[in-house]
Image (cartoon, helix red, strand yellow):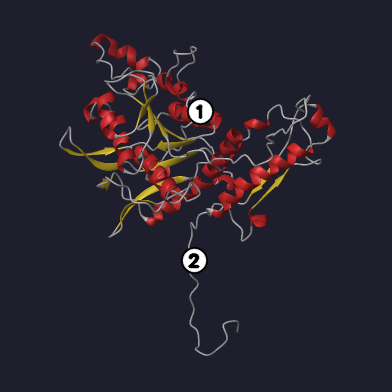
Amino acid sequence: MPEYLSPGVYVEEVDKGTKPLEAVGTSTAGFIGQSKKGPVNEATLITNWGQFTRTFGEFADSPHLAHAAYGFFNNGGARCFVTNVGMEGAPPPPPPKKEEEEKKSSPPPSPASKGGPSPALFIGKDGGPGNKTGLVTFEDIDEIAIVAAPGMTDPAIQDAVISHCEKMNRFAVLDSEETIEKGGVDKIKKPRDSQYAAFYFPWIEVYDPAKDKNVYVPPSGHMAGIYARSDNSRGVHKAPANEVVRGALGLKYNISKGEQDILNPRGINCIRAFRDRGIRVWGARTVSSDPSWRYVNVRRLFIMVEESIKNGTQWVVFEPNDHTLWKRIKRNITAFLLRVWNDGALFGQTPEQAFYVKCDEETNPPEVVDAGMVVIEIGMAPVKPAEFVIFRISQWQSGSSINE
């Protein structure tokens, strides 16, 4: 309380209003790859294709990074951070003839010696401020929501991307290998189980101005752009599927319905060519085996809500932990989730059916309060995509009751 010592009129400001929670961005991507040009191991903000070419060069200057960035911006992306890990790991020169016999008896070569980059370049390390490499360069950038390593199909690299997203509460977009093994689509190798990643097949055909011909490129850059386009036009709760892949002229493999019947249950999202409808993303699943986190949009919706609440409730720290605080927290979060429900992201005809927020004596008994904690319980009913649309059609005799 202020101290009043002399007669007069005093005005006090009392903070009793709500503190609105703002939804965090969901469409900023982080791309990690290799380029001959540009800064190395420095996350650089790129907002358009022209800026990318000035910083990291043209299509000929990188194996996959330039095509991924072009596909991202062409499909609706607006902001991305790019980390160039350098061009180490290029194919080594052939060994002398006298070493051929030694090679036959030596263990299998590492991924780098096969011509691919070393996973260590992408995994990176934390050497302190200004001395971070690989994926670690993304850890200080809060706005990144989508992470991709275009064309990197090495299991160690994909595992590192997934682990980064699980740690940072982000979502990974992963590429399949360009060529599948003999035996068909059932031989496609997918990454490890995770609710924070989606996996796309096959590679897409695009025009390469540097080579003046069509080439096949990994789809992750284009998919990140489609995520951004869908988020901006419909919202993060809309599954980024049944969307046209802009710039795609063809596919490495044309997937049939029967083949997708094998791939979809495994969490492998197909990109398919449809007559008169173009090339479209035709899958919206994560690589998780947990049915609760089967769909990309459900996981990304929860990421958005979690990050928004975390950022918007920092004012709570060190406040008096009593009933007044509990009511303010509940009021603020309820107001935010009401907006989420109004946007169509939650299932239910009323807010009570769509979500609940609980912060009271039950969630905060004396032992919790004494430990300096305040516990808020939140439940949400997310909308799921209409993955299987079923029309039940039968003959009906005119004039008869529908319920007969």
Q: Residue at x 47, y 32 (%)?
A: 143
The one of 90 and 259 positioned closer to us in this rendering: 90
Give the percent coordinates (x, y) of residue 38: 29, 20
Q: Residue at x 64, y 55 (%)?
A: 351
| Residue 303 sits above or below residue 113 on the image | below
User: Helix, strand, or loop for circle 2?
Assistant: loop
Give the percent coordinates (x, y) of residue 19: 62, 39
Is residue 130 left or right of 55 when viewed as pictured?
right
Which amino acid type is shown beneath numbered disc 1? His
Is residue 369 left or right of 119 when viewed as pictured?
right
Give the residue at the far right of this rendering: 366
| Residue 71 sits above or below residue 391 on the image | above
Which amino acid type is shown beneath numbered disc 2? Ile
Give the residue at the far left of this rendering: 212
The label shown at residue 164 is 1
Q: Residue at x 52, y 42 (%)?
A: 300
| Residue tagged 2 | 390
Q: Residue at x 47, y 16 (%)?
A: 125
Residue 210 visible in image: yes
Choose the circle earlier in sequence order: 2 or 1. 1
Give the percent coordinates (x, y) of residue 318: 71, 26
Q: Quadrant of the C terminus?
A: bottom right
User: Helix, strand, or loop for circle 1?
Assistant: helix
Identify the image quadrant of residue 130. top left
Is residue 396 left or right of 374 when viewed as pictured?
left
Spatial CA span between label 2 and label 1: 38 Å
Residue 377 visible in image: no
Give the residue at the far front of this rendering: 7
